[in-house]
Amino acid sequence: MDIEGSDDEVPVLVEPKVAVQDDDEVPTLVQDPNALPTTKVPLTIVTGYLGAGKTTLLNYILTAQHGKKIAVILNEFGDSIDIEKQLTVSDSNSTTAKPPPFVPLANGCICCSAKDVGVAAIENLMDQGGLFDYILLETTGLADPGNLAPTFWLDDGLGSTIFLDGIVTLVDAKNVLKSLDEGYGDGEEEVEKRRHEHDHDHDGPLLTTAHLQISHADVILINKTDLVTPEELEKVVERIRSINGLTRIKTTTKSEVPQLEGFILDINAYADVTADDLTFASKGHSHLDATITTSTISFPALTPEQVDKFDLFLRTILWEETLPNDTPHESFEVHRLKGRIPITDGRVLLLQGVRNLYDINEAKDPVREGDEAKLVLIGRGVGQEGFRKSLSQMLAS
């Protein structure tokens, strides 16, 4: 008799042994191999003009001995691509979707190159590449981060395993003012396109890619500071602050950031809104840039009955891109907003927004006596008096 049995032989079914368990005994829990991970991986978008130092920064991160497992995705997002629809990573020579190869590196990080990816595609990449502590997503030089951020933010309902930690923008200290004033680096076609998109006359303020990348940034790395004088660097910092009063600014040479936490990793840009941040934002010189400004609106604590009215104000300016109550106004575009809204019942509401998406959560700390509400808007045309007037009318109605 063949002890091992033939391939065609019907296997003998063995009655499984059932362990007798005491009614009071705690049952053994078996982990589901198909269960989703309970922790989410933070994703940082890294943007900036060609030549600003993105590649140097990523090379630094991929070779430095920082003890962190970081997945760097070198991306090729195009400005005209509908990113939300790009849910696969495609090979132009194949009819099927497949993940691109990963390159393992000596410090535990990995690097890959992908094209036209969204949330599902990046999750697919992570499934193929293993577990990582952080994901850095590089964009093309002319990418508008305002088109990317909503893709990775507020997707809890989709059960995503990644979340947006923040947007980091690199700028070239030597050329950033020229980029802001003249569209240097955009190209003539892009400059002309932006003029028509935003109804600029040819003598009016120009909205450049540099404006968009700075206005959406949670952290700005001013690189190549060794190529400018201290006086020139001060002008660059003031101009950037006038555009985005909420951002953290770090000056670098050769894109070296010895302390990654707080500037590249663990930014937590969408996790909290502090009163100090909003107060600091209101001290900027918004008159230094005619295109994009930071505007702060202060008002008394809301009553519980006014919360819905405030929410209606937000929906009107973000979704309908107009001011409530037929308030006269020029065209505007909100890129980023944050707010800290005390309520007379003791609660404090924290507001975060990017483009036409916003989220309101309740703060852990209760309201302090004498607290006033602050709403900070970053964008084009957000400094108009009509914003304050229409909000005041809405809350009084």
Image (tube, rainbow, N blue to C red):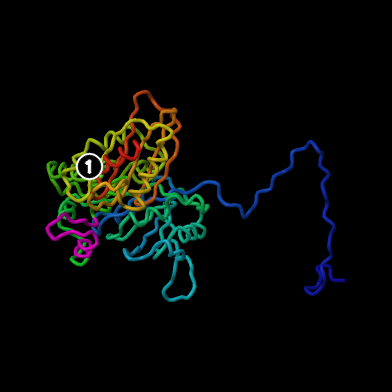
In the rendered structure, does residue 57 fall within the stretch colored magenta? Answer: no
Q: Nearer the viewer, residue 215 or 69?
A: 215
On-image quarter of the C terminus: top left
In the rendered structure, does residue 192 fall within the stretch colored magenta? Answer: yes
Residue at position x 53%, y 52% from top?
159
> Looking at the image, is 389 positioned above or below residue 176?
above
- In screen coordinates, is 396 left or right of 126? left
Residue 147 lies in quadrant? bottom left
Residues shaded magenta:
190-209
Helix, strand or loop at label 1? It is helix
- In screen coordinates, is 296 left or right of 287? right
Residue 328: x and y, percent?
Answer: 24, 48
Farthest top residue in view:
369
Q: Nearer the viewer, residue 271 or 359?
A: 359
Farthest right residue in view:
1
Residue at position x 83%, y 44% from top?
20
> Looking at the image, is 268 positioned above or below residue 150?
above
Residue 206 lies in quadrant? bottom left
Residue at position x 22%, y 57% from top?
208
Q: Nearer the viewer, residue 102 or 190?
A: 190
Residue 285: x and y, percent?
Answer: 18, 40
* Mark 1 Cα-neighbour bin, 10 Å: few <14, some 14–19, many ≥20: few
Q: How many marks are shown on the rendered structure?
A: 1
For mark 1, what is the residue?
385
On-image quarter of the N terminus: bottom right
Residue 162: x and y, percent?
Answer: 47, 51
Residue 125: x and y, percent?
Answer: 47, 60
Residue type at mark 1 is Glu
Q: Nearer the viewer, residue 184 or 277?
A: 277
